[in-house]
């Protein structure tokens, strides 16, 4: 595990890693299909949000898992062909408000990602 939240080549690195490695990164990670369906939700993300992985897999992230992100600040940005943007945000769904730094990632691969650090 050699990639950091702010790494310039993290999207390429994420696309090559098995879920066992992604589960060990020191930040929250949501791996989604291009239509927003959760395919992987790591342990760090469970700790940040209090939402268990088994309650996310196969669900649409922006409408079923974290509807507080279904807005122009987060979800709408994934409509771009390529995306690498950081956003300060507050999660408000299913938890008391949690301040986070999000890194929204999308490229030519099959998946898009949301990286999450509690701030």
Image (tube, rainbow, N blue to C red):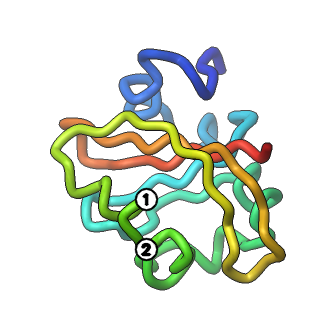
Rendered position, 69 above or below 12: below
Q: Answer whether labels 2 and 1 touch (C-beta < 8 Å).
A: yes
**In the picture provided, is 104 more to the left or to the right than 78?**
right
Q: Nearer the viewer, residue 112 or 100?
A: 100
Q: Which residue is mark 2?
A: 70
Q: Position of residue 89 (x, y in %)?
A: 62, 55
Q: Residue at x 59, y 19 (%)?
A: 3
Image mark count: 2
Mark 2 residue crowding within 10 angstroms, few (<14) / some (14–19) / many (20+): some
Observer able to see residue 12 = yes
Residue 18, given in percent of the width and then of the height, sits at 51, 38
Where disc 1 sits, the SS reads: loop
x and y percentages locating residue 97 in the rendered image = 78, 70
- Left or right: 93 in relation to 12: right
Quadrant containing the N terminus in the rendered view: top right
Numbered tag placed on residue 74 in the rendering: 1
The vertical placement of 64 against 45, above or below, is below
Q: Quadrant of residue 99?
A: bottom right
As displayed, is residue 60 above or below residue 78? below
Residue 94 lies in quadrant: bottom right
Label 2: which secondary element? loop
Which label sits on residue 11?
none
């Amino acid at each position: 595990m050699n990639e950091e939240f702010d790494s310039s080549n993290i999207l390429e690195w994420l696309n090559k890693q098995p879920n066992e490695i992604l589960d060990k990164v020191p930040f929250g990670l949501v791996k989604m299909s291009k239509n927003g369906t959760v395919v992987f939700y790591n342990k760090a993300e469970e700790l940040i949000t209090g939402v268990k992985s088994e309650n996310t897999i196969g669900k649409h992230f922006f409408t079923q898992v974290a509807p507080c992100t279904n807005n122009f600040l987060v979800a709408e940005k994934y409509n771009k062909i390529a995306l690498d943007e950081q956003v300060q945000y507050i999660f408000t769904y299913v938890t008391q408000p949690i301040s986070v730094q999000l890194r929204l990632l999308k490229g030519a691969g099959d998946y898009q990602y949301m990286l999450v650090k509690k701030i």
